[in-house]
């Protein structure tokens, strides 16, 4: 099963990726998490990505395409994968196609910008695993701690309101065209296209996803 999660920053891609990974036993390929891991490790890639990400801009297509190509070639992706945050531009989607990587389902999470801005203020993350929480809508069992490891949760540097608004602008300009792109792919019979109302409660979105992907 090969799935693309499409949607604005904060639409719930990472949250539902946790659910889908557990349900279908496929790995999550989150380009954001991969870049944050590279920053933490202080690699050359991380050094190049840090400033761009903190400013809410997109990392270059060339760099991201290389990263995903390498990741998809690994053994654990043979039975399928969940792309979270990729593709994010038309050239990234074209690169996938040119490399013969097909997908079964594209899931779009539809959430209005103002809801997203409000959500991001309450987001907390476990940087080691990429697990995502929300102070109100998806709280951890113990305040400020990751459910699995008990380690501290943190605030992402790009969750500051002005940066979120910048990321939303880039989403509408560069990523939203992928909605038409993949709807056309679905019309041509190349994949299934599913639109989810991402403003429902987390569990309600998961339940609908399970139904749609059954
Ligand atoms: P990335 O890490 O991919 O961030 P993003 O796409 O901006 O998405 P987010 O992780 O912010 O949001 P999400 O949709 O996963 O929402 P979440 O589930 O956390 O990318 C970061 C940066 O890396 C980019 O800006 C760019 O610089 C670079 N980058 C990455 N990929 C790239 C690429 N392909 N090309 C170029 N550059 C790239 O949910 C958000 C909050 O809402 C959480 O607190 C959650 O608990 C809560 N929540 C979730 N669902 C619900 C719900 N149904 N109801 C209420 N609250 C909810």
Image (cartoon, rainbow, N blue to C red):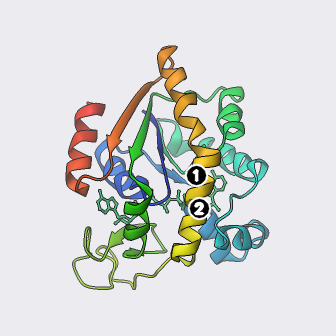
Residue 88 can be seen, yes or no = no
Q: Name which residue lies at 42% across and 28% down.
A: 193
The image quadrant of residue 3 is top left
Answer yes or no: do the residues labelled 1 and 2 have beta carbons within 8 Å? yes
User: Residue 128, how many percent across, how many down?
Assistant: 48, 73
Image quadrant containing the N terminus? top left
Q: Is residue 74 above or below residue 150?
A: above
In the drawing, what numbered circle is on residue 102? none
Image position of 86 with respect to 35: above or below: above
- Is 5 situated left or right of 203 in this image? right
Which residue is the site of mark 2? 167
From this viewpoint, which residue is outermost toward the top? 188
In the image, taking residue 137 as reference, residue 51 lies left or right, namely: right
| Alpha carbon distance from label 1 to label 2 | 6 Å
Q: Residues within 10 Å of mark 2 (few under 14, many from 20)?
A: many
Is residue 126 left or right of 134 when viewed as pictured?
right
* Callout 2: CB less than 8 Å from ligand 1: yes
The residue to which callout 1 is attached is 171
């Amino acid at each position: 099963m090969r799935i693309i999660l499409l949607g604005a920053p904060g639409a719930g891609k990472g949250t539902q990726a946790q659910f889908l990974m557990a349900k279908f036993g496929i790995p999550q390929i989150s380009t954001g998490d991969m870049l944050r891991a590279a920053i933490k490790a202080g690699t050359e890639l991380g050094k190049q990505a840090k400033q761009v990400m903190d400013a809410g801009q997109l990392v270059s297509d060339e760099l991201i395409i290389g990263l995903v190509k390498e990741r998809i070639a690994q053994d654990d992706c043979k039975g399928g994968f969940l792309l979270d945050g990729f593709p994010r531009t038309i050239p990234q989607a074209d690169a996938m196609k040119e490399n013969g990587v097909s997908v079964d389902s594209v899931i779009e999470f539809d959430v209005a910008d103002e809801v997203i801005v409000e959500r991001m203020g309450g987001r907390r993350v476990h940087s080691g695993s990429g697990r995502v929480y929300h102070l109100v809508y998806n709280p951890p069992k113990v305040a400020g701690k990751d459910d699995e490891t008990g380690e501290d949760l943190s605030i992402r540097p790009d969750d500051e309101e002005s940066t979120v608004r910048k990321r939303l602008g880039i989403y509408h300009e560069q990523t939203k065209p992928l909605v038409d792109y993949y709807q056309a792919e679905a019309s041509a019979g190349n994949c299934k296209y599913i639109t989810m109302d991402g403003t429902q409660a987390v569990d309600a979105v998961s339940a609908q996803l399970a139904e749609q992907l059954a």
